[in-house]
Image: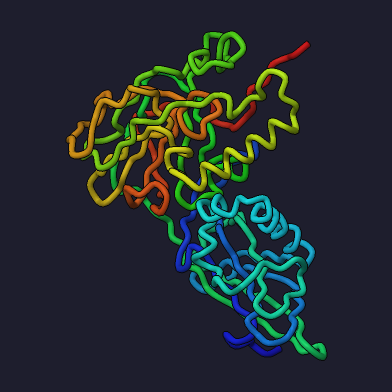
Amino acid sequence: MMTASAEQLEIRLYPHDHIFVFQTSWWDLLSERTYHNAVIHTTAIMNLSAETLAIDRLTVEAHASDRLISRYVWQANDLLGLAEPVKGRIIAGLGRMLELVLFMHQALPTEVELASSSTLMPNEALVIPNIYLPFHALPDKLNLIVDAVGRDGKKVSAQTELKVIEYLGKNEYTLPVEGSWFMKAYPETGRLDHHRFGVSNEFGVDFLKLGSGGELFKNDGMLASDWYSYGEKVFAAASGKVVATHTSAVQEWTRFHPADGESDDDFQQRALREVQAALAGDVLDWAAGNYIVIEHSNREFSSYLHLKEGSVRVKGGDEVTGGDHIAEVGNTGDSYGAHLHFQITNSKDLINGRSLPFSFKGMSVDLEEPGKFVRSVS
């Protein structure tokens, strides 16, 4: 087999050079085991040759000190199934959303088009989103290899390497809320964590307050104030300097619910138009709502999103101490129910910054295993 030159078959990734691995543990009734996981957010397989190339497979090998510890293989049909929704979102006018989540422009040249099959015409590509990888041992690098077949059955391949880094937080953070809360969408839940599949919020967490019966809201939950989280105090997780705030967002609750007499289809079409309009405007206002970003030592930044209208108590340049009351929980932005989104990043830029793994000190965990809140319905 020959190795393809850059003029034939190429793999480009985002992030380009490294990804962060997350460590967690589980019990199998005999002992505690540690495992690691990571996400490759964007993998672009491109045909930059002058001939047609039929993709055969993608292989991802995980290495630890040049020792192979895991190998994953996706056949052509598997890759196409993963890539089709990417093209579908673009056709639906949601390309800007893909950019926010996958940063496709960082991996895909403007002259390359998305393919409709695993056989790539010249200047076509398959974009594979969010490859989730669990490991039984801590890897330090990944090798990605694409095999394809060209004209007259000639086999070609391309490969690239990606570093895997176990990032250890440089600061200590306390919970940004007080009392008992339901913490969801956190990295320990693996594939169940929707945050893991966006570069800028990969290691974020959501906090929701529960009622005395374990419920999330009272009445029918149709109003923001029905939710027990709404209006609860938000505290600075560590001392630092406020470097960004947004305070003008107002929750438009109708974006999540059909209007009286509106059919499900009409509601879906309206929601799509509203998302398209939002993506063409102030994306951060639409996604994050009211927010605060605080810079801490060692170039780590904490962010507090979906804050209640009129509740932000700090402004840019203010110095805060860990535990200071800085805002209240709301549901502004892309927030179906009132909750607090919290994360640590390497930048104050909530769109282009990179999410970092972190941990809380002084937090007790009442229920270790992930689960679902359920209730009977008549």
Residue depicted at x 70% and y 85%: 156
- Figure quadrant of residue 336: top right
- Figure quadrant of residue 88: bottom right
**Left or right of 202 in this view: 172:** left
Residue 367, placed above or below residue 193: above
Residue 300, placed above or below residue 270: below
| Of 310 and 220, the residue lying toward us | 310
Q: Position of residue 315 (x, y in %)?
A: 23, 33
Question: Split into 4 quadrants, where in the image is the N terminus?
Answer: bottom right
Question: Split into 4 quadrants, where in the image is the C terminus?
Answer: top right
Q: Position of residue 52 (x, y in %)?
A: 75, 82
Residue depicted at x 36% and y 20%: 178
Residue 335, placed above or below residue 297: above
Q: Position of residue 292 (x, y in %)?
A: 32, 35
**Left or right of 194 in this view: 229:** left
Residue 88, placed above or below residue 226: below
- Figure quadrant of residue 223: top right
**Left or right of 372 in this view: 209:** left
* Res 36 seen here: no
| Of 135 and 332, the residue lying toward us | 332
Residue depicted at x 48% and y 19%: 209
Residue depicted at x 18% and y 35%: 318
**Left or right of 79 in this view: 21:** left
| Of 357 and 250, the residue lying toward us | 250
* Res 199 seen here: yes
